[in-house]
Image: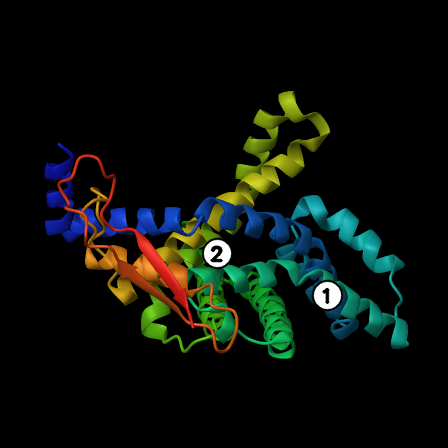
């Protein structure tokens, strides 16, 4: 049965490609990566929203109506009282205000640093080839600014969609499409800025498109989903139900983003078909194992070589696999 299923998925890309994506997700410890992104996303949301609201309050001080509409579109209703209170207690001008914004930006970099590590891990970039301390921080801060600008742009499009006639949900559809376009641009730019090797739009657009649709859908129906999650979690978690519901939504988004990124890598590097029978690895298996090994090269002069041990027969029932790895450092 195993041999028949293995042969079937190797012959048919419709079966082999999804299995290769799931297999690479497992090889890359995808669940752990998604959990880290979820955790840092939760910790970064409040500082980044506070920065955006503070800047909007300064820029649109003479346009209170527009400022209120943008903040309503940008900040979830559950967080608005907390954000409003925090903005009123922040320094309002001068050096303290600037230092406060810098501190909030630093607090909001956690999710971008996590995304940086995850993207380079999925792409198999050796650690010796990744960005140094200063370039890494510069790119992370640049990406934080891009995320903030993208959030304000999505909120602006949402407000602008309110001018359309509300026929058959046209306003909601226009807002969702505008948000998806903005998120697509942010995700595509994130791949180019954070991955320490050249990434073309042709390679990154499938992952960016799937992620954009997912984020837009969650933002469009997130309030209703969160209410359902909170109501179901309240009996167990009580006052922590809102936190649990927020974590659940963030984890779903992180998982979708991670799977879409894995699919883009598998597609671009032709990492399929993968073997169901590990005693008969495919060239894609060899390539994935090689990438995982060479990723650990840390010193500029360090090189890891991966060889497959072909001395054991594939049909030997006493061996679980004939592909043991040997590594050499030079």
Residue plotted at (62% across, 35% down): 244
State which quadrant residue 266 falls in: bottom left
Assign the N terminus to one quadrant of the image. top left
- Depth check: give the residue in front, 303 or 283: 303
Q: Position of residue 82 (x, y in %)?
A: 78, 48
Q: Nearer the viewer, residue 268 or 303?
A: 303
- Residue nearest the viewer, comparing 110 with 99: 110
Query: Taking the image as drawn, is residue 218 in sight?
Result: no
Left or right: 260 in relation to 71: left
Instruction: Please indicate whether residue 166 sits to the left or right of residue 71 in the image.
Output: left
Q: Position of residue 269 (x, y in %)?
A: 28, 66
Residue located beneath label 2 in the image? 171
Q: Residue at x 28, y 61 (%)?
A: 307
- The residue depicted at 40 percent of the width and 49 percent of the height is 168
Q: Position of residue 238 (x, y in %)?
A: 69, 25
Quadrant of the frame with the C terminus: bottom left
| Label annotation for residue 205 | none
Answer yes or no: is residue 204 visible: yes
Q: Between 26 and 189, which is closer to the camera in this rendering?
A: 26
Asked if 64 appears above or below 272 in the picture, the reply is below
Residue 165, percent across and down?
47, 58
183 in relation to 231, above or below = below
Q: Mark 1 highlights which residue? A: 106
What secondary structure is marked by label 2?
Answer: helix
């Amino acid at each position: 049965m195993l041999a028949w299923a293995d042969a079937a998925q190797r012959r048919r890309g419709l079966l082999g490609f999804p299995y290769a994506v799931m297999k690479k997700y497992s090889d890359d410890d995808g669940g752990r990566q998604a959990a880290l992104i979820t955790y840092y996303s939760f910790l970064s949301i409040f500082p980044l929203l506070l920065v955006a609201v503070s800047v909007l309050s300064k820029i649109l001080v003479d346009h209170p109506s527009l400022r209120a509409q943008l903040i309503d579109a940008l900040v979830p209703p559950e967080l608005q009282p907390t954000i409003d209170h925090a903005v009123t207690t922040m320094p309002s001008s001068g050096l303290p205000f600037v230092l406060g914004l810098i501190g909030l930006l630093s607090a909001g970099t956690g999710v971008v640093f996590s995304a940086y590590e995850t993207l380079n891990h999925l792409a198999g970039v050796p650690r010796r080839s990744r960005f140094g301390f200063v370039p890494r921080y510069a790119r992370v801060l640049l990406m934080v600014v891009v995320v903030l600008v993208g959030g304000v742009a999505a909120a602006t499009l949402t407000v602008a969609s309110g001018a359309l006639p509300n026929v058959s949900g046209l306003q909601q559809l226009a807002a969702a499409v505008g948000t998806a376009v903005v998120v697509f641009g942010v995700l595509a730019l994130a791949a180019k800025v954070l991955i320490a090797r050249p990434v073309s739009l042709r390679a990154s657009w499938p992952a960016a498109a799937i992620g954009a649709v997912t984020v837009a859908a969650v933002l469009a129906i997130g309030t209703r989903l969160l209410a359902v999650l909170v109501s179901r979690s309240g009996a167990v978690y009580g006052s922590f139900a809102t936190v649990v519901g927020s974590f659940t939504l963030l984890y779903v988004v992180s998982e979708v983003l991670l799977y879409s990124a894995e699919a883009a890598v598998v597609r671009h590097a032709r990492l399929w078909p993968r073997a169901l029978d590990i005693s008969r690895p495919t060239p894609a298996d060899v390539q994935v194992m090689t990438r995982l090994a060479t990723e650990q090269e840390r010193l500029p002069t360090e090189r890891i070589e991966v060889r497959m041990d072909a001395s054991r027969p594939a049909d030997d029932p006493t061996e679980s696999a004939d592909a043991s790895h040997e590594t050499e450092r030079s």
